[in-house]
Amino acid sequence: MPTNEQILDALQKVFDPELGRNIVELGMVRALSIKENGEVSFTLALTIPGCPMKNQMERDARMALMALPGVNEVIVTFGAMTEVEKKAVFAKGMPELPKLNKFNRVEKVIAVMSGKGGVGKTSITAILACALAHSGKKVGILDADITGPSIPRLFGLPAGGLRSSDQGILPAVTKLGIKVVSINLLVPTEDAAVIWRGPMITGTIQQFWRDVLWGKLDVLLVDLPPGTSDAALTVMQTLPVNGVLLVSTPQELAGMVVRKADSMIKQMKVPVLAVVENMSYFTCPDCGKAHELFGPSHIEELARSVETQTWIQLAIDPKLAALADAGKIEAYSSSNITELIQKTEI
């Protein structure tokens, strides 16, 4: 059976995402109880009753405690701090965000997001980076998909390709001069699994921003994984994101999940620059007719719902898939992506 000290030690790994400090340090853990049957219960005192991050903190606390030997059940109830307690917490100030390496100057940070997996965020990030590089801009890609990275494969960059210097981590560089940082450039083989919990994912993304020698960039593109959890939250709170490109596919199911991502973006007060409907149609190579393989488009309706007037549609293109698999994504071009750059002034 774990002791009080062991319980509190485990809970010190659970952070309030907005304050950047652990819930034990903040005095949020109250009425801790450990029963002989392995039941652990406590009250989580929130800074405000309707704290939007309370479910994430509850989930992280539950996972941290269930990993302890002897814990069979975790019961978390919610409470609220008094005004005096809140003043004491905020008197210590907000945590300082990781600063950009002093050798770097990044003009714009654009996140590519969906909330939904399998809609093509990574390929769109890659071809957008290529189009920007062809236009003469200095471009970088921060692969924030820590547990499912694939950006290096698209550009033919080998695993283990990052090196360090006195000024910071040196990013890999593609043939077009695009600077890339990804966890798959650190692991020994590209098939190696990264089995990490939230705090390690958060720390790695912050390190990719803070410790990489990006140099001067006109645009840094951030390829986000599916969902609205650790990686997305870290990017929105740590990096000075100028805007988000939302990626969807024609199915209403995909649109529903994208609207969830938009809900998070609105809470973070980051603007949506445009919506990209990927795999919108397939053009028959024989007759030239466009076929809506995944049903009719909902792009205009989705764009209105996320409050942007800018949207584009991308076709299913076997050539893109072939070049991506071969690590030759830089040979691909899309007039629609060029149009997107012009519309959004990225």
Image: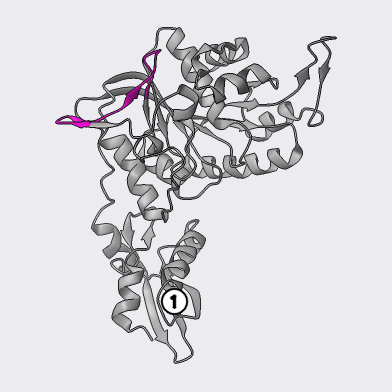
Q: Which residue is drawn at 43% across and 79% down?
A: 42
Q: What stretch is highlighted in magenta?
A: 164-179
* Residue 330, position as x, y percentages in the image: 49, 15
Query: In front: 233, or 267?
Result: 233
Q: In this view, does 99 lie to the left or right of 326?
A: left
- The extreme bottom residue here reads 36
- For disc 1, the marked residue is 43
Q: In this view, does 275 lie above or below 6?
A: above
Q: Which colour scheme is used?
A: one colour
Residue 129 seen in this snapshot: yes
* Residue 304, position as x, y percentages in the image: 68, 30
Say how many tags the image has.
1
Q: In this view, does 203 lie to the left or right of 230?
A: left
Quadrant in the picture for residue 189:
top left
Q: Which residue is drawn at 39% across and 43% down?
A: 237
Q: Is residue 15 above or below residue 143?
A: below
User: Split into 4 quadrants, where in the image is the N terminus?
Assistant: bottom left
Helix, strand or loop at disc 1? strand
Q: Residue at x 29, y 40 (%)?
A: 207
Asked if residue 311 is among those painted magenta in the image, a careful observer would answer: no
Badge 1 density bin: few <14, some 14–19, many ≥20, Cα 10 Å: some
Residue 345 seen in this snapshot: no
Q: Is residue 302 left or right of residue 67?
A: right
Going by the numbered disc 1, the residue's amino acid type is Thr
* Residue 272, position as x, y percentages in the image: 55, 30
* Residue 199, position as x, y percentages in the image: 37, 54
- The extreme left residue here reads 166
Q: Is residue 74 above or below residue 21?
A: below
Q: Residue at x 78, y 31 (%)?
A: 294
